[in-house]
Image (cartoon, helix red, strand yellow):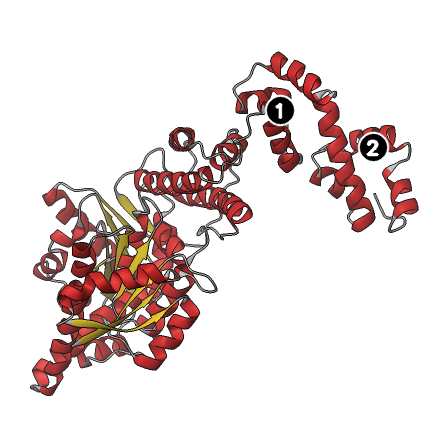
Amino acid sequence: MYTYIIIDDESLIRKGTIKKLEGISDKISCIGEASNGQEGLQLIKDVHPDCVILDMQMPIMDGTQLLPFLAEKYPKMPLVVISGFRDFDYMKTAIAAQAVDYVLKPFSKETICDCLLKAIDKIAGEEEVKSRLTLTEDEKETALYEFDIQYLTNLIHGYNQAGSTLSSQKLKYINDTHDMVLFTLSMSEDIHGLKVGDWLDEAGFGDLVLFLPDSSDAFNGFLIFFMPEHTIKPAEQLIKQITDSLFNYARELSIGLTIGVSRIHHDLSDLHVAFEETAEALNQQLVANPGIGTYIYQKEYGPKNIVWDKEDEFLFRVESGSTEEVKELVLGLFTWFKSVQSLNLTDVKYYCFLLSVKCSKLLNFYMNQPGSSGSPSMQNIIQHIFKIDELENYYRQFFCNISDMLKDESIYSSEDLIEKIKYYIDHNYEKNLTQEFIASLFYLNRSYLSTLFKQKTGMKFIDYLNDLRLEKAANLLVSTDKKMYQIAKSVGYDNTKYFFRVFKKKYLVTPEQYRTTKGLGPTAP
């Protein structure tokens, strides 16, 4: 009999899930419940379940914090994730690397039972391998080698298991006597159906190469090349020999192949560092002209500074829950990416990361819920994406999900158009706001906006904006020791002289005089 616990902050969900699993109670049973991740961790330590069912959204410690910890401390324990997030299909990629199943609420009895039955199969499979350790020495070595393959895959992904080392004599010997180079392969077709390892063996590489499919992405794989102890060929020539053979194989199958190559490393414990090097190399692909090729890591690459002229509009559409507009803007963004000849994947990933941080801040501001832009699962997904179209699909899903969640908050639901415009200005005064831009956000004619704003507020648009900015500046003058140019910039004035002029017009004194009489005393401009 196998056991599981369930971690979910909703008692009804916990009870309902247990009820749905009664049909397989002869195979697995619940031995505990917890209402948050912190309680769940303690429960796992107390009762040692075979499997864990957990929700993503919980107080104190949610799933995004709990999953990485469980993956590291309990790598063999199957995890089943349940979530109320709509369309979070991208999570399936993240959890695949940890042998985790994922279901969306509301889920059927059949769905949750299937998940637990798969967990049972996984546990039973590992127990069978362990039982083989009592057999012959050859069989034991085979079983230990299988353990090592999973261990190496975990190392590549960065899931280090405390105290874990190589177990099989074969890989111990190779590791002690050979340096290694990691190749990350990005293919145009599902790599799991290809017999890359068999083909390399037939090509004469034998024990010098070890092929590992990427469990988190069906189109990626890893090849560990063990450098021969005695060879007259330089490393560069041996690496080229490997890559040429791989491209020949890809051509035979009529599939696209891109290869990232790491530096030479002296120990398999460096596999994650080697993977990061191959990822950085692959990220040098130009998005305007992606194609087959080999990218060898040479140094750390820095992203370019990207300026998207529709960024402020995009953030407004996300904030207002305009999901269809968000989808169109993401399409336009990636179309623009592909048109710029000098941009590579590093540039695109970095800009999209910055954009996701800003969207996540909106989510946190309105829902008191941190976004997942910097979560380990999300960064793990992005790190394994080496195709621009796949990256576009991922971020379109991500941004639309945030927009959908903010739509329920009805941030701009007021029927008073000018109140909505004032709300936007009050929260974005530091940006480059013009009447033309505001009119475009709310689908208005510029002159109509000007007339309507004056009617409703008794002020011109520019006067309202300046008054707000200057009030914020006055507060900063007396509450901080920021320099004048810093204050001007932070409230929306790029021109410090202009800031001085409008400030004096409103307060009849210069900013320095205002600070001296109201607050911190003189400071350098």
Which amino acid type corresponds to the residue marked 2 in the rendered image? Phe
Judge left or right: residue 357 versus residue 120: right
The location of residue 315, given as percent across then percent down, is 51, 36
Where disc 1 sits, the SS reads: helix
Question: Which residue is found at the position 61% from the left and 27% from the top?
Answer: 421
- Sequence-earlier tag: 1 or 2: 1
Which amino acid type corresponds to the residue marked 1 in the rendered image? Ile
Q: Nearer the viewer, residue 10 or 171?
A: 10
| Residue receiving disc 2 | 503
One can see residue 172 in this view? yes
The location of residue 435, given as percent across then percent down, is 63, 21
Spatial CA span between label 1 and label 2: 26 Å
Circles 1 and 2 in contact, beta carbons < 8 Å: no
Residue 418 - label: 1
The location of residue 370, given as percent across then percent down, is 49, 53
Question: Which residue is found at the position 38% from the left and 71% from the top?
Answer: 40
Q: Nearer the viewer, residue 216 or 15?
A: 15
